[in-house]
Image: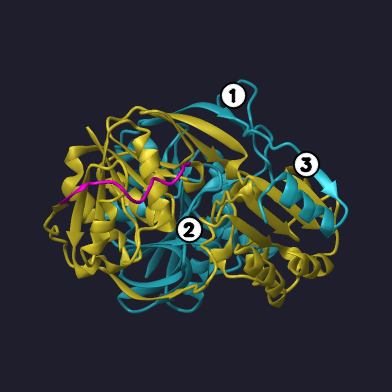
Amino acid sequence: MRTLVIVEHDNENISSSTLCAVSAAQKLGQDVDLLVASSANHIAEKAQQIMGISKVLNFVGDNFKNEIAEDLTACILAVSKDYNFFVASSSTTGKNLMPRISALLDIQQISEVIEIVSNNTFKKPIYAGACIATVESQQEKNIITVRTTAFEKAVPEGGSGQIENIDIPEVESRKSVFVGNELTVSDRPELTSADIVISGGRGMQDGNNFALLDSVANKLNAAVGASRAAVDSGFAPNDYQVGQTGKSVAPNLYIAVGISGAIQHLAGMKDSKTIVAINKDEEAPIFKVADYGLVGDLFEVLPELESKI
Amino acid sequence: MKILVPIKRVNDYNVKVRPNQSNTDVDLTNVKMAVNPFCEIALEEAIRIKEAGNAEEVVAVSVGSEKNQEQLRTALALGADRAILIKTEVEVQPLDVAKILVKIFEKENPKLVLMGKQGIDGDHNQTGQMLGAMLSIPQATFASKVEINADSVNVTREIDGGLETLSVELPAIVTTDLRLNEPRYASLPNIMKAKRKPIDEINLEELGLSIEQKVKTVKVESPSEREEGIKVDSVDALLDKLRNEAKVIE
């Protein structure tokens, strides 16, 4: 049997989380095909170059511009009989889509997989990462979403997948319509794929103070993140949120500023290679996971850091 | 309009849950239990919609043991009009819960199902989407804003790159994200009043579903701990470590 990976894209580029999903899929030891649903052919043409993949199932139609779950579900179901594994990243797109497929194929999905032990055994965090569960599927077909920080990115070029164009399945009247979006525009790298991330917590005291993080981030070419406490306090938008209910990141360097280190936050960043904590409370739990801790006032430390990088 | 709000009983989010001695499951002995925070947000939104005159009834439903009465009483104290408990002692997974909710949906015919995007125990983030698919009705997940219209609902969703707004036809499933609202606390008079509100009990067997654990948990362990590092006493010392020891910046 074969494995199908659902490709996520923004109509221009394939998302880096898809590359992680491909390398996770390759660990299953079966042929890996990709499913692309988009409004033009160039996404499939990019997808076919991903190293190590076999086929690209290409659905082209205007409906697919905004990755509406109901529309994508119809495409996946149309080809599902050839596959016993369906893999997507646990991005908001994957989370939104895959359970719909699971329900219609009567499969209990396994979310946020961090390790593929064998073709029926997987590891995944539970309780905000406080525990790691090893789960065994008794099913012939499986659907998994993978945590991207746990898998390397597949090489995006050099592959030679065959594109197979497939007719768009009939969808009953569309009950879900895209109205609009407000995407965060930034020159800095994307949070989940950045090499360096600097995040602020409640200690930042005010949203305006995030400018201090921005200036350090600009010098380091880092992405800016936030703890849930900072997001809840309105200091930063929700798509900055790192943690159980936000994003998982694992950069080379993670700098936590004014973050106490609640377990829900640690869940999203403790796999980072090097962790720095800057906090005025020397008892803050964040220091327990930090490689380098600096006890001090962030309003003095950040400008000094910025001037010396 | 009637709104159905599923309520999950989970550990209190302040409690750090650990594996049991034999590493077969988590140890929830003496752990304080509560309404899943995302379900609380869903309930709050449902009550606000009712208070704004856009819904007549809010029905809370929970699947689990007799102990779930506690969380349903909380839901009633917060403003749900009545509650349904689907009683079972067996472990139910998201696919099972979705199948159970289909039965309740068919019985109650709500216009809107408002539910949490995930339980903070299993962190699955599946049930709402599964329910939508099984009922062939649209979904709007991870909501940070909900606007009710005559035949549809406009939902602003928290997505990775920012926000997205969908218009979905009713009936629909909406799952809630953190920023949708800030749930109220139950007042003492409302807690007293909640004691008189009805909770219907239905045995899971009566629904005629076969529940099977398609995925078995074989081991639960603590994650590998990071070793605590060192404290540095100045920005210069920190930069020196990052440049020359960790070699993560230039």
Extreme residue toward the right, this view? B233
Q: Amino acid at mark 3?
A: Gly
**Residue A222 appears in the rendering:** yes
Asked if residue B228 is among those painted magenta in the image, a careful observer would answer no
Q: Secondary structure at mark 2?
A: strand
Q: Judge by depth and name the residue closer to the eye, A146 or A302.
A: A302
Q: Which chain is drawn using yellow?
A: A
The residue indicated by pointer 1 is: B23
Instruction: Identify the residue shown where x is 22% and y is 49%.
Output: A56
Q: Judge by depth and name the residue closer to the eye, B236 or B73.
A: B236
Q: Judge by depth and name the residue closer to the eye, B42 or B81.
A: B42
Q: Quadrant of the C terminus of chain B?
A: bottom right
Q: Is residue B111 above or below residue A262?
A: below
Instruction: Identify the residue shown where x is 22% and y is 46%.
Output: A161
Q: Secondary structure at mark 3?
A: loop
Q: Which residues are magenta?
A: A151-163
Q: Quadrant of the N terminus of chain B?
A: bottom left
Q: Earlier in the sequence, mark 2 or mark 3?
A: 2
Q: Could you tell me residue B217's position as x and y percent?
A: 47, 29
Left or right: residue A218 compared with residue A108: right
The residue indicated by pointer 2 is: B82
Give the label on residue B229, or none.
3
